[in-house]
Image (tube, rainbow, N blue to C red):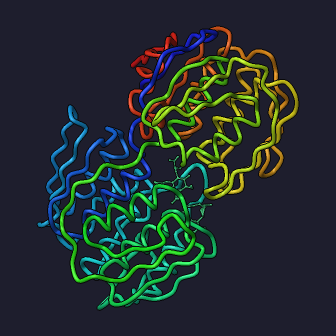
Amino acid sequence: MSKIVVRGGRKLHGEVQISSAKNSVLPIIAGCILNGDKCVINNVPMLEDVFVIIDILKSIGAKVDINKIENKVIIDTEDIKDCMPDSELVKKMRASFLIMGPMLCRFGHFKISLPGGCNIGTRPIDLHIKGLSALGAKINVGYGYVEAFAKKLVGSNVYLDFPSVGATENIIMAAVMAEGETIIENAAEEPEIADLGRFLNSMGANIMGIGTDTIRIIGVKSLKGTTYKPISDRIECGTFMIAAAITRSKFKINGVNFEYLKPIIAKLTEAGIYIEPKGNSVIVDGNRELRHIDVKTMPYPGFPTDMQSQITGLLCTVKGTSIITETIFENRFMHAAEMKRMGANIKIDGRSAVVEGISKLTGAKVRATDLRAGAALILCGLAAEGETEVSDIYHVDRGYVNIEEKFKLLGADIERVN
Ligand code: EPZ
């Protein structure tokens, strides 16, 4: 199992390029099931999770050409069959669920293995089931599978108890060729959902209100292939902003969308970090007296849960008491135990972490417990005195393209060791 070794204490400088958003690309690739045609997706991040969802589509008959030089993926779903996707692949990733809506819409049926447990929380699918059932699906969950049948999908009104990202995406993709109009209220507003909506509309769907909490979908008869470029990854960008802050450095981040970064920028500015937009780049200056702050994760446009472990790492190095409250997932503080091995002073109290900032973290052997926790530990390693070794780095490779190469380009003393 490969690991990343960081020798901390260096200032970072220069520029870094952000990749396209993993959490856009995954539902977009799943959405290719809908049209039985050919789609070209440009600027695709070559991530483990992307390869998993591509292999899932190939396991049901899609033809996929991956061009790693041009970061382009061509997906032909003409020959996709109404069959069960490979269960071992499905269990690798919660986002496998995103094929439920498209399969139901195209074939009126799907059967998929329930993925294994996820370490940041139970990740139920009751809201997915509520939405798909409202459109006319009969859904059974049992024996480790979820299966759905629908003679015909008919548009309906769905009010989501919680603005679930995945449930919103699945209901949209099931509704695009349902008969009549579907309205989703209390829909998730994450930018990646708006990106999926634009992608589907480019295939001929009729979706309105994307990016708001009320989405209207008028079913159409069919969809055709398209060429599409997803938005940039706001969470990767936020991770690099925290890298500037935690190492008290100043550098430029290219290929960003300032609008989508506002919730993250608001919080980092509150902590005293200087962030200046420059076209589709931002200059981040963390080389200043930073302030301790309180953070509460919320659905977009609140502060994103996917940035929680990273900002927790930062606040471990900022004098004073900071309280971080995680309202989205029930078990997303596993990074705390690892950060304490680096000298951090963190007390977990229910859904909150109480952090007493210290002047210097010290390098240690730590373990990535999930994608964003692993990224946060690398950030802590960049700031720590001495050497930090982050193992189980495959978690990080699910969501960050060549993370150590990008930090090396910024001047970090970092390497991947197999
Ligand atoms: C998406 O997961 C993202 N993944 C996650 O990013 C992100 O953390 C999450 O949204 C929240 O923003 C992708 O987009 C591939 P949810 P998803 O459904 O869709 C509860 C990363 O690091 N819930 O909005 O699974 C659920 O238990 C990953 O890139 C139900 O109760 O998130 C959780 O507490 C991690 N019933 C909350 O909602 C349901 O039917 C948020 O889940 C569905 C969800």
Residue 88 versus residue 205 in the image, above or below = above
Left or right relative to 52: residue 37: left
Camera-side residue: 96 or 220? 220
| Residue 347 can be seen in this image | no
Camera-side residue: 365 or 171? 171
Left or right relative to 385: residue 105: left
Residue 366 image point, x, y percent? 61, 25
Q: Residue 403 falls in which quadrant of the image? A: top left
Q: Residue 141 falls in which quadrant of the image? A: bottom left
Residue 65 versus residue 225 in the image, above or below = above
Q: Quadrant of the C terminus?
A: top left
| Residue 89 can be seen in this image | yes
Residue 218 image point, x, y percent? 37, 83
**Total labels drawn:** 0
Residue 147 image point, x, y percent? 37, 77
Residue drawn at 33 percent across, 73 percent down: 111
Left or right relative to 238: residue 14: left
Residue 381 versus residue 329 in the image, above or below = above
Residue drawn at 30 percent across, 56 percent down: 29
Q: Point out the quarter of the image occupied by ligand 1.
A: bottom right
Q: In which quarter of the image is the N terminus?
A: top left
Residue 102 versus residue 241 in the image, above or below = below
Q: Residue 284 falls in which quadrant of the image? A: top right
For the view shown, which residue lies furthest in the left direction? 79
Residue drawn at 42 percent across, 16 percent down: 417
For the view shown, which residue lies furthest in the front direction? 279
Camera-side residue: 207 or 61? 207
Residue 413 image point, x, y percent? 51, 10
